[in-house]
Image (cartoon, rainbow, N blue to C red):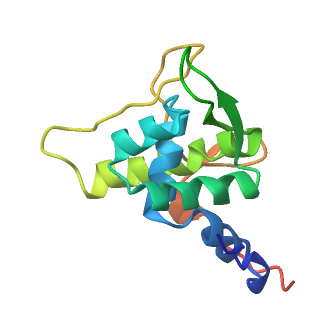
Amino acid sequence: MARKQVDDWQCSVGRSATILGDRWTLLILREALLGTTRFADFQTNLGIAPDVLTDRLSTLVEYGVMTRNTYQEPGQRVRPAYHLTPAGRELHVIVGAYQQWGDKHLPRPEGPTMTRRAKRTDRPVHVAFVDDLGYEIPADDVASIPTGN
């Protein structure tokens, strides 16, 4: 696997997209957030080619999004297991934003395939911009301002 050229980008969006901007990577993250940890389960659940899965998981491990550990079933060989790091768990917001956008703009006739709820209250949640006082700000009221760096 060739190391990704993250440093080619000055912009954080470009740097992040170099690692995370692939369809398979987002789907791997979705599966990991749902609790999938085993290579074979990722492959089965996603229908992804093993070489592509190996490449994407290796990249996620290399950049600290996931860790690679091992497990062994009785009588079986040692196999890798992949777990999200704290940085990987932070990507729940991104995966949630993708789903939220897709549910709104590319809806399935059968409805959404997943909902998100607060663990403590069981209330539905959504992805939004929130200011430093904790208030939700409509996306149309958010300015993107270059810092000049």
Q: Quadrant of residue 2?
A: bottom right
Res. 143 visible in picture: no
Query: x, y (%) of residue 104?
Result: 30, 51
- Residue 80 horizontal/vertical position (percent): 62, 37
Asked whether, in this view, residue 88 is left or right of residue 53, the answer is: right
Q: Position of residue 87 (x, y in %)?
A: 74, 45
| Percent of width and height locating residue 71 | 64, 26
Q: Nearer the viewer, residue 83 or 23?
A: 83
Quarter holding residue 121: top right
**Residue that lies at the very extreme toward the front in this rendered image:** 75
From this viewpoint, which residue is outermost toward the right?
149
What residue lies at 62% left-to-right and 47% top-to-bottom? 91
Q: Which of 55 and 143 lies nearest the eye of the viewer?
A: 55
98 to the left or right of 10: left
24 lies above or below 4: above
Q: Residue at x 74, y 76 (%)?
A: 6
* Residue 29 appears in view: yes
Q: Quadrant of residue 116?
A: top left
The quadrant the C terminus occupies is bottom right
